C-alpha cells in the first residue's frame, strides 16, 4: 500500500502545437481571461490513460480509437464483469483490482441500475502556461473535395479550413496522490511508480495533426514524497517551490525560463522529511 503522500509537477514544452483545443471556440488553444494557455485536467488524464495502455496497464475508460477489447461503450465493458445482483462494495473492490485508471482516478458507475462512486487518490489540476501565449492561425486547403461542389465552382466549401497553434510556451501540470484514498482503492507504491513513468513519457505515441511529433514534450518531472500519509507541508506550498524567470520577454526556449526549485524553502521542507526527485522527460 501507499504509505506516503505524493505531490508532483510536470513542465511541458509546447512548440507550434495546439496543446488543448476548445471545441466551443473553433478548436482554438484554450486560454484564460488573461491570455495564459490552459490544458484541461480531462485532457491530461486522457493522455495518462493512453500512456498507461502503452505500458500494458488495463484501462476502463479507453478512447474510441484505442479500444483493446470488443466493447464499444463503458456500459458494455462494465456489464461484462458484473451483474445487477452483485453487491456495490464487491463491485467497487473488483473494479479497483481490474482497472488501473479506476483505482488511480476513481470512477462513477451508473450501469445495471446502480450508482457507485469510487474516489481515486490521484488528482490532476488544469495545467497553465507560465506566460501568456501567442496563438497563430493558418488557413489550410484540402486538395480534394469532400463533397460535390455547387454550381459552377470546382471546389466545395469543405476544402478550406483553419489551423490554430501555440507559437511557444511552457505549461505546468500539478498533481497529488492522497495516501488515505489510495488505501481505499488499493493503489500501491508500485502503481505510483507507474504513474511517474507515464508522466515522464506523457507525449510519446501522441502525435496528431494538431500536435506533430516532437512539438510537445515533457521537460522535467518534480516528484515530492512526504514522510507520512498526511504530508509534511500542504500541496499548495509544494507547488510554490517552482520558480521561473518572469523578467525576460519573448522567451523562445526552455532555458529562457530558468526553471528551478526554491532551494531555501525546499531545504526547510526536507528537514521535515520531504524527499524530492527530479526526472528529465523523454
Image: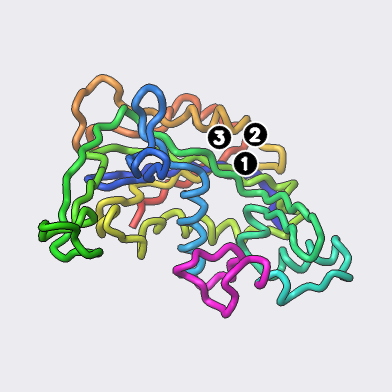
Q: Which residue is mark 3?
A: 270
Question: In the rendered view, would you say 239 is above or below 52?
Answer: above
Query: Percent from the top left, x then y, of residue 99?
Result: 65, 67
Residue 253 can be seen, yes or no: no
Along the viewing direction, whichever of 90 and 79 lies nearer the viewer: 79
On whether residue 66 falls in the magenta region, the answer is: yes
Residue drawn at x 75%, y 46% is 180
Q: Which residues are magenta?
A: 56-76
Say which quarter of the image contains residue 149.
Answer: bottom left
The N terminus - image quarter: bottom right
On whether residue 248 falls in the magenta region, the answer is: no
Number of the label disc, if any, that sits on residue 232? 2
Along the viewing direction, whichever of 47 and 271 lies nearer the viewer: 47
Query: Percent from the top left, x then y, of residue 196?
Result: 50, 55
- Mark in front: 3 vs 2: 2
Circles 1 and 2, Cβ within 8 Å, touching? The answer is yes
Which element type, helix, strand or loop, lies under badge 2? loop
Question: In the rendered view, would you say 27 is above or below 35?
Answer: below
Residue drawn at x 73%, y 72% is 79
Residue 229 can be seen, yes or no: yes
Q: CA distance from mark 3 to mark 2?
A: 9 Å
Determine crowd level at label 1: few under 14, some 14-19, many 20+ residues with C-alpha closer than 10 A.
many
Q: CA distance from mark 1 to mark 3?
A: 9 Å
Which element type, helix, strand or loop, lies under badge 1? loop
Q: Which residue is mark 1?
A: 226
Q: Earlier in the sequence, mark 1 or mark 2?
A: 1
Residue drawn at x 47%, y 29% is 241
Question: In the rendered view, would you say 66 is above or below 197?
Answer: below
Query: Percent from the top left, x then y, of residue 69?
Result: 56, 78
Which element type, helix, strand or loop, lies under badge 3? helix
The C terminus - image quarter: bottom left
Amino acid at each position: 500500500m501507499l504509505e506516503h503522500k505524493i505531490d508532483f509537477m510536470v513542465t511541458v514544452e509546447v512548440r507550434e502545437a495546439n496543446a488543448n483545443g476548445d471545441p466551443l471556440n473553433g478548436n482554438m488553444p484554450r486560454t484564460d481571461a488573461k491570455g495564459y494557455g490552459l490544458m484541461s485536467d480531462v485532457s491530461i488524464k486522457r493522455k495518462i490513460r493512453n500512456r498507461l495502455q502503452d505500458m500494458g496497464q488495463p484501462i476502463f475508460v479507453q478512447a474510441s480509437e484505442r479500444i483493446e477489447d470488443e466493447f464499444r461503450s463503458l456500459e458494455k465493458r462494465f456489464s461484462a464483469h458484473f451483474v445487477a445482483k452483485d453487491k456495490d462494495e464487491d463491485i467497487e473492490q473488483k473494479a479497483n483490482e481490474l482497472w488501473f485508471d479506476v483505482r488511480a482516478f476513481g470512477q462513477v458507475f451508473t450501469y445495471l441500475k446502480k450508482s457507485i462512486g469510487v474516489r481515486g487518490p490521484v488528482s490532476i489540476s488544469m495545467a497553465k502556461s507560465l506566460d501568456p501565449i501567442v496563438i497563430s492561425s493558418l488557413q489550410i486547403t484540402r486538395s480534394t473535395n469532400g463533397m460535390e461542389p455547387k454550381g459552377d465552382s470546382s471546389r466545395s466549401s469543405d476544402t478550406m479550413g483553419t489551423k490554430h497553434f501555440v507559437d511557444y510556451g511552457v505549461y505546468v501540470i500539478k498533481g497529488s496522490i492522497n495516501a488515505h484514498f489510495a488505501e481505499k482503492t488499493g493503489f500501491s507504491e508500485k502503481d505510483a511508480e507507474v504513474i511517474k513513468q507515464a508522466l515522464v513519457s506523457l507525449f510519446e505515441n501522441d502525435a496528431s495533426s494538431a500536435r506533430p511529433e516532437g512539438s510537445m514534450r515533457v521537460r522535467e518531472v518534480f516528484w515530492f514524497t512526504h514522510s507520512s500519509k498526511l504530508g509534511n507541508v500542504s500541496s499548495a506550498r509544494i507547488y510554490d517551490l517552482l520558480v521561473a524567470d518572469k523578467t525576460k520577454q519573448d522567451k523562445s526556449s526552455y532555458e529562457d525560463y530558468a526553471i528551478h526549485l526554491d532551494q531555501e524553502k525546499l531545504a526547510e521542507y526536507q528537514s521535515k522529511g520531504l524527499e524530492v526527485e527530479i526526472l528529465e522527460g523523454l
